[in-house]
Image (cartoon, grey):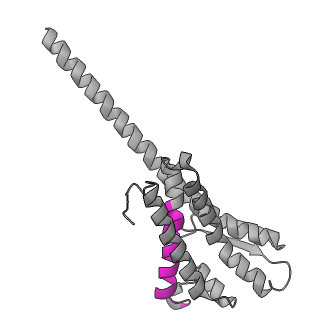
Amino acid sequence: MKSWLKILFTLACLQTSSVKALESDLFNALQTVGGIYSSIYIHELGHAIAYKTLGATEISIEVPMKGKIFGGLTTATIPKDEFTQREALITSAAGLVAANLAGEIVIQNPKMHSSAFAQSMLGTALVSNVRHVQTYYTQYVGKDGYTGNDLDHFESQGGNPHLFAVGLLAYSAWSLHRMNKQKIPLFFIHLNF
């Protein structure tokens, strides 16, 4: 009879650790999804703050944007006929800058390095940088309904999208290198970079 009790006790302990592992995995998954959407929202909030600072009204943020799982859209009513070139360039770049600043806070704060939420905010910002550059060079505004991303808008306002793209890629590479040195995973994957 005592051996049955030992077996039941062992099974109960194993079951408890399995449940705790599943609970931990689910919590990490929720944090990761929350971090991804928070990064997207911070990106759009960057655009919104730039619009608001420059006098726009009726600012609206849509995350996720219609028809997409990942991505967002910020719209605003510009009070005058049009922003100056400098103002338009600022609003185009503000989203990527805001998301990267949020990611930089994660890199600079060791207490955040083990948080799945913080890791995914940082990872999303870096993936977004690369994705913006890749999309800019592979898709064309007006073709197949594509309306452009921040690099396309930056170019349409007279900015140099190639320098912006190089800056995004260089910052992303430098961030990945620092993440490797500080043992911060990119979406649960430790990279040697």
| Left or right position of 79 against 186 | right
x and y percent of residue 86 in the render?
A: 77, 84
Residue visible at 69% across and 70% down in the picture: 47
Compared to residue 4, the image places residue 51 above or below, namely below
| Left or right position of 82 against 38 | right
Q: Quadrant of residue 41?
A: bottom right
Asked whether residue 71 appears in the rendered view, the answer is yes
Give the tally of numbered discs.
Answer: 0
Q: Is residue 141 magenta?
A: yes
177 or 186: nearer the eye?
177
Q: Is residue 159 magenta?
A: no
Compared to residue 162, the image places residue 103 above or below, namely above
148 or 98: nearer the eye?
98
x and y percent of residue 114 in the render?
A: 48, 47
Asked whether residue 186 appears in the rendered view, the answer is no
x and y percent of residue 121 in the render?
A: 54, 58
92 or 75: nearer the eye?
92
Magenta residues (range):
123-142
Residue visible at 34% across and 33% down in the picture: 19
Residue visible at 68% across and 72% down in the picture: 94
| Left or right position of 173 against 56 | left
Q: Quadrant of residue 171?
A: bottom right
169 or 161: nearer the eye?
169
Q: Main secondary structure of the magenta part?
A: helix
- Quarter of the image containing the C terminus? bottom left
> Farthest residue toward the top?
1
x and y percent of residue 44 in the render?
A: 65, 67
- Quarter of the image containing the N terminus? top left
